[in-house]
Image: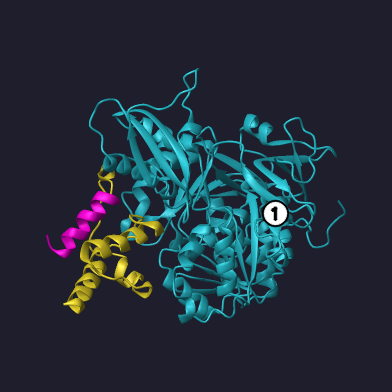
């Protein structure tokens, strides 16, 4: 592949630093009722980077950012990079058990979270030997006893530390972030992205979306989800403005913001579009919308038509990707009517093909696994060589390629159509959910003898999560099961339905036969 | 049960878990405390419609009406009053 002028290797912090130099007083971020310029965010990130270094973060160290979408999270992401560290955004609805797993798995040296979660942070510090310091955002009145002085306040850092960037050595081939994704074993795996990987993926997406400095993107997706995170990274790279919302919980508020800020780019997932299609959108002037994107799960053809009818002036991109390569495929909008069921072709500067189980390349209309090659192929899973070896292998030209685990076929022109997954991972609300992770949590609940978690088709969620439970004879009701799930799992992993059965279908070797359940 | 008690009972049954001793005050934001997530707000809307027989319009679903026990109680009572 020839050197691409539009995708030069660079550091991720350069996205912010370049824009702060070239567009100093441009509003970069609209969030939490505040409007922050590139210069303001850059100096806030510099101050926090100095504090991180002071707190013992060394180049290459992992820092957990356990925060909801907020100004502080944006600042923290760039602060970690400026300190030479590797950022790990943790979904704000993560519970203690999983937080501890993540902290220990990546041996984080610092944690950034909200002051209201001080108790959780204190437990994480006590249970994770590598954790040296915690930075707390928000109201310090929530701070509990801090005799060791291991808690530092975000606001205090902004007052006390210098606004010059600390001199930390950083290279494009260093790790920039870990993005944890569900594994079929039930244990999350951290996908390792270098600065080069991120810079390339962001450049390629910016190229096909034709983003310009005058674009204003709105993001309602959590930054712990790579689709959400890249809205921030891309915007800062092309020097636009990001309207960052905490969630899509109040659609009316989001629509009003889109109108008021003259938003040009709207990334969504099928769940969000399903809600929008049930609303009366005539009340809002959304004529500024230049494009809409969908990924994480395919939109039903009827929804594609309805979205096109609602926003005839906007381009609609159907896309497909996996965290292991960030984005993989996109359908050029002009192809949408001819091939509504397709998620398109390889993103610019990359290559894809289909293989059968013997590694033979397949032609049109033959179903096989999607294999991906290009500078967006990430480095593998953090300290998990077995899982890395299954997913990432050496390609024909000596470059590492990614085996997606997803089955596709292509048409005569090479446009790809999703068929299904090779494993039993559920996609709900656009996020990957490992049935095993939920089953492990349910097996810890007294009264559960056997459990199988499956995905069932759902118009709004893509797939709804269903747990089928065999009780050991004790009285266990649905509410108890749901409470247990809600206290141990992230929101998007909590099952929508619980069913109790007397037994589960088994194979001759005694394994639960999930195919017979759905 | 008055409106606030009914809301509290619903939140307790469906969203709060007693294990960590977390206490939600009537003014605490559902979303900021993480008690209710974005899908949970949709469930809350259904609860209000079914339990109180109130028609909830899209533009009613805003933080001022749905983000705390107190907000929701005031909203339900004003809607119920309007229906009388």
Q: Residue furthest right?
A: A2
Q: Is residue A317 left or right of residue B43?
A: right
Apparent colour of chain B = yellow
Q: Residue furthest top?
A: A509
The image quadrant where one finds the C terminus of chain B is: bottom left
Residue A271 visible in the displayed image: yes
Coloring scheme of the render?
A: by chain
Q: Is residue A141 left or right of residue A91?
A: left
Q: What is the magenta range?
A: B1-15
**Could you tell me residue B41's position as x and y percent?**
35, 61
Question: Is the residue A53 above or below the residue A515 in the image?
Answer: below
**Residue corresponding to mark 1:** A329
Apparent colour of chain A = cyan
Question: Is the residue A434 above or below the residue A195 in the image?
Answer: above
Q: Is residue A421 left or right of residue B50?
A: right
Kindly state the secondary structure of the residue where label 1 is placed: strand
**Could you tell me residue A239's position as x and y percent?**
66, 71
Residue at position x 40%, y 59% from top?
A: B38
Tell me if residue B4 is in the magenta stretch: yes
Q: Would you identify the image quadrant in which residue A209 lies?
A: bottom right
């Amino acid at each position: 592949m020839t050197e691409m002028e539009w995708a030069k290797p660079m550091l991720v912090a350069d996205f912010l630093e370049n824009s702060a130099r070239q567009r100093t007083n441009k509003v970069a971020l609209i969030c939490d009722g505040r409007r922050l310029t590139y210069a303001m965010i850059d100096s806030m990130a510099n101050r926090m980077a100095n504090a991180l270094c002071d707190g013992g973060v060394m180049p290459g160290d992992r820092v957990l950012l356990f925060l909801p979408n907020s100004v502080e999270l944006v600042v923290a992401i760039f602060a970690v990079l400026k300190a030479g560290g590797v950022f790990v955004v943790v979904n704000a609805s993560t519970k203690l058990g999983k937080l501890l797993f993540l902290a220990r798995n990546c041996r984080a040296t610092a944690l950034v979270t909200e002051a209201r979660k001080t108790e959780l942070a204190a437990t994480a510090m006590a249970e994770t030997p590598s954790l040296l310091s915690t930075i707390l955002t928000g109201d310090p009145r929530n701070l509990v006893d801090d005799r060791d002085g291991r808690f530092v306040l975000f606001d205090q850092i902004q007052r006390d530390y210098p606004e010059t960037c600390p001199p930390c050595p950083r290279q494009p081939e260093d790790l920039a972030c870990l993005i944890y994704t569900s594994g079929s074993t039930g244990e999350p795996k951290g996908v390792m992205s270098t600065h080069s990987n991120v810079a390339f993926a962001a450049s390629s997406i910016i190229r096909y979306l034709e983003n310009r400095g005058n674009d204003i993107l709105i993001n309602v997706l959590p930054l712990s989800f790579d689709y959400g995170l890249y809205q921030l990274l891309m915007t800062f790279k092309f020097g636009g403005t990001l309207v960052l919302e905490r969630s899509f919980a109040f659609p009316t508020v989001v629509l009003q913001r889109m109108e008021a800020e003259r938003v040009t780019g709207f990334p969504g997932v099928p769940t969000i579009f399903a809600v929008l299609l049930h609303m009366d959108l005539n009340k809002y002037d959304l004529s500024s919308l230049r494009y809409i994107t969908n990924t994480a799960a395919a939109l039903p053809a009827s929804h594609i038509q309805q979205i096109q009818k609602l926003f005839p002036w906007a381009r609609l991109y159907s896309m497909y990707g996996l965290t292991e390569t960030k984005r993989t495929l996109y359908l050029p909008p002009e192809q949408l009517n001819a091939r509504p069921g397709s998620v398109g072709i390889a993103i610019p500067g990359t290559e894809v093909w289909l293989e059968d189980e013997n590694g033979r390349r397949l032609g049109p209309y033959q179903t096989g696994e999607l294999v991906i090659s290009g500078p967006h192929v990430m480095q593998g899973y953090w300290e998990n060589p077995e899982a890395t070896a299954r997913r990432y292998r050496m390609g024909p030209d000596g470059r590492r390629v990614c085996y997606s685990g997803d089955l596709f076929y292509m048409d005569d022109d090479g446009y790809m159509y999703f068929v299904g997954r090779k494993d039993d991972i559920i996609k709900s609300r656009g996020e990957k959910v490992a049935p095993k992770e939920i089953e492990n949590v349910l097996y810890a609940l007294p009264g559960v003898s056997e459990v199988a978690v499956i995905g069932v088709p759902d118009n709004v969620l893509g797939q709804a999560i269903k747990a089928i439970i065999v009780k050991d004879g004790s009285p266990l009701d649905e509410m108890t099961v749901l409470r247990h799930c809600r206290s141990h799992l992230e929101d998007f992993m909590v099952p929508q339905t619980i069913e109790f059965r007397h037994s589960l279908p088994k194979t001759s070797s005694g394994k639960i036969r999930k195919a017979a359940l759905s | 049960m008055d409106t606030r008690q009914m809301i509290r009972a619903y939140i307790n049954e469906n969203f709060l878990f007693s294990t960590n001793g977390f206490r939600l005050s009537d003014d605490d934001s559902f979303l900021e405390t993480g008690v209710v997530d974005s899908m949970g707000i949709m469930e809350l809307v259904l609860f209000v419609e079914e339990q109180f027989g109130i028609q909830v319009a899209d533009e009613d679903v805003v933080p001022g009406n749905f983000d705390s026990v107190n907000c929701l109680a005031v909203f339900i009572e004003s809607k119920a009053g309007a229906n009388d």
